[in-house]
Amino acid sequence: MKEVMTKKKDDSEISYFMEDAILFSLWAFSNPNFYPKEYFDVGDISPFDRWQYERVFDFLIKRLEMVGVAVPEIDYYSDIDEGTLKPLSTENLKKQNVEIKKAARKFLNNNFSIKEIKILAPIFHEIYEIIYFQPKFSKEDVKKMLKQIDEYIEKFLNNELFVYDRNYLSFEKQKQFFVGKIRKMSALEKYGENFVISTSSFEKDDDDDEDADEEEAFLFVHTLYALQKLGYIGVLRLWCKRDTLRNKHLYFANIVANDILIDEVTNSFRKENPATTFEGYDEKHNLLKFAGKAIELSKKNKETDAVLLIKTLRKEPERYWFNDELLEDWGYQPHDETAKNKAYFAARKINEAVKMKTGIDDFIDHNTSKFRINPKYLKVDE
């Protein structure tokens, strides 16, 4: 019988699967912009509870060693109360071996290294809570660490990670799940291209059982980094909070959605809502044809601002028209103060009319200065 060769777990393998929490720690550790202060402890960069700090600590050290980056300087504050240091008291050290006693003396004299921390951790579990890093990575060090993450994410993008004890969605499925949740929270409609998204946004509703498996296999941090690497988004900030009531951690990210992601969201909507499209404008009767409805924009064929706006926007429906362009197209002089808000109120009137007929309130995508027909309602060949 032919022997089957299996690959063993090895943290030093670039393609060895990291939990999201571990990748978060490495990403934060590798990016000086994420440092919350000059000094920080493991808890500042780890979403895990304190019982798992040692695992995060060991992992970070191993990853630094992989790329030849020195572990940053470690220190601890001198005003720690005696109760915290009780495991290192003379009485408690009597039964310990010589190696532990030496390590304890060095630690108490503030003359310790990673070696002493690892020796003391089995008897002094709180040690990871009271040590502080003072990161002073060079630009070259940061470049090496980020290169390592990029190589790892490349494996993730190509579905080449070694996984031993859990399932996760392929990257394409992860992206689709991410896009679906952006749509579900109406992020682009409510907030524009710059918004905050969190893992709480991905938790299933009580009546949403079909998302249960995807939620379990979804990797929020992995997907964020991968989408940024591919140019879908820019991550401005990434942070984590402990949800003590449910004994879990939640991630939050402030992201900027680039055009390629916006197009994905738009196309996703179009596929699921083929009948919700802009079918054209009947100029003879001033009727906007949308989602199978004929929506009247003015009485007795009057050329109102709403009529002028839809006529102009349909000339080039896929782009934003800026306020001064619209006014010029309508025959107004530049900087005419009497006309500066006409397009804004016209857009609101159109959206209100469409909402009354269809329930949809974002047909015109606009703010006070730029306007377009929402691209998710355009036919693919428009």
Image (cartoon, helix red, strand yellow):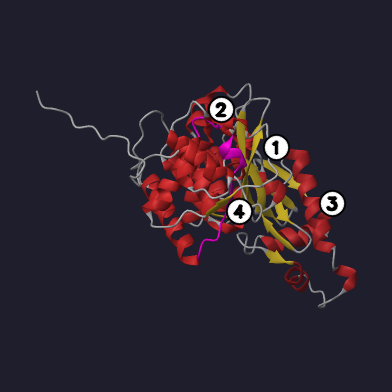
- Across and down, in percent, residue 235 comes to 58, 54
Judge by depth and name the residue closer to the eye, 312 or 141.
141
SS at mark 2 in the image: helix
Check residue 81 in the rendering and tell me which mark sits there, or answer none: 1
First along the sequence among labels 3 and 2: 2
Residue density around tag 1, few if under 14, some if 14–19, many if 20 or more, within 10 Å:
few
Q: Earlier in the sequence, mark 2 or mark 1?
A: 1
Q: CA distance from mark 2 to mark 4?
A: 39 Å
Query: Magenta part of the protein: which range?
Result: 121-138
Mark 1: which amino acid? Asp
Q: Which mark is first along the chain, 1 or 3?
A: 1
Residue 34 marker: 4
Q: Main secondary structure of the magenta part?
A: loop
| Residue nearest the observer in this picture, 15 or 12 | 12
204 vs 231, left or right, is: right
Using the image, determine if residue 294 lies above or below residue 92. Answer: below
Q: Is residue 226 above or below residue 318?
A: above
Which label belongs to residue 92? 2
Q: Quadrant of residue 239?
A: top right
